[in-house]
Amino acid sequence: PYSTPHVLLAGATGSGKGGAIRVTAAAALYGGWQLIVLDPKEAGEYAWLELLGVPIVTRLQEQVETLERLASLRRARQEVVRDRGADTWLALTSDWRPCW
């Protein structure tokens, strides 16, 4: 069955978080997912994703706006799921899933 993963990645400096993020991002892109990266440190470690067309958001105000747009999208999707009587977004047939 399909699911939408939610991940919290935490650890000490040098513990491998960056490597885990790189592997996860690459797998998500390979799977056809759309990514948006919020990079408050502006360290440049996501430049490879930017080369692949993934938006890298570094400015605080743009990060806030991005999160607000994603929250709005989530609410709209939840409304469609609720209106159709489905359990999840992926339980809807593709004709009931607008491409946002």
Image (cartoon, rainbow, N blue to C red):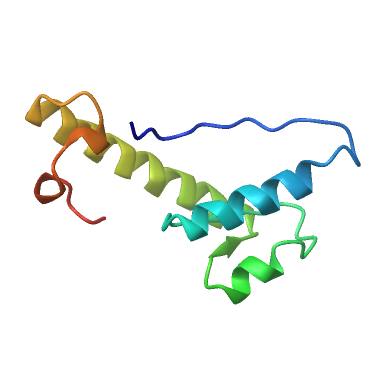
On screen, 24 above or below 1?
A: below
Residue at image coords 28%, 35%: 75
Residue 57 in the image, given as x and y percentages of width and height: 59, 60
Residue at position x 65%, y 59% from top? 58
Foreground residue, 67 or 97?
Answer: 97
| Figure quadrant of the N terminus | top left
Outermost residue to the bottom: 51
* Location of residue 45 by image quarter: bottom right
Q: Residue at x 80, y 60 (%)?
A: 43
Outermost residue to the front: 1
Snapshot quadrant of residue 46: bottom right
In the displayed structure, does residue 2 sit left or right of residue 37?
Answer: left
Question: Hey, which residue is sitting farthest right in the picture?
Answer: 14
Q: Is residue 64 left or right of residue 80?
A: right
21 in relation to 79, above or below = below
Q: Nearer the viewer, residue 13 or 5?
A: 5
Residue 97 screen position, x and y as percent? 17, 47
Residue 69: image x %, image y %?
38, 48
The quarter of the rendered structure image containing the C terminus is: bottom left
| Residue 71 in picture, x, y percent from top left | 38, 39
| Residue drawn at x 61%, y 48% as measured from the top left | 24
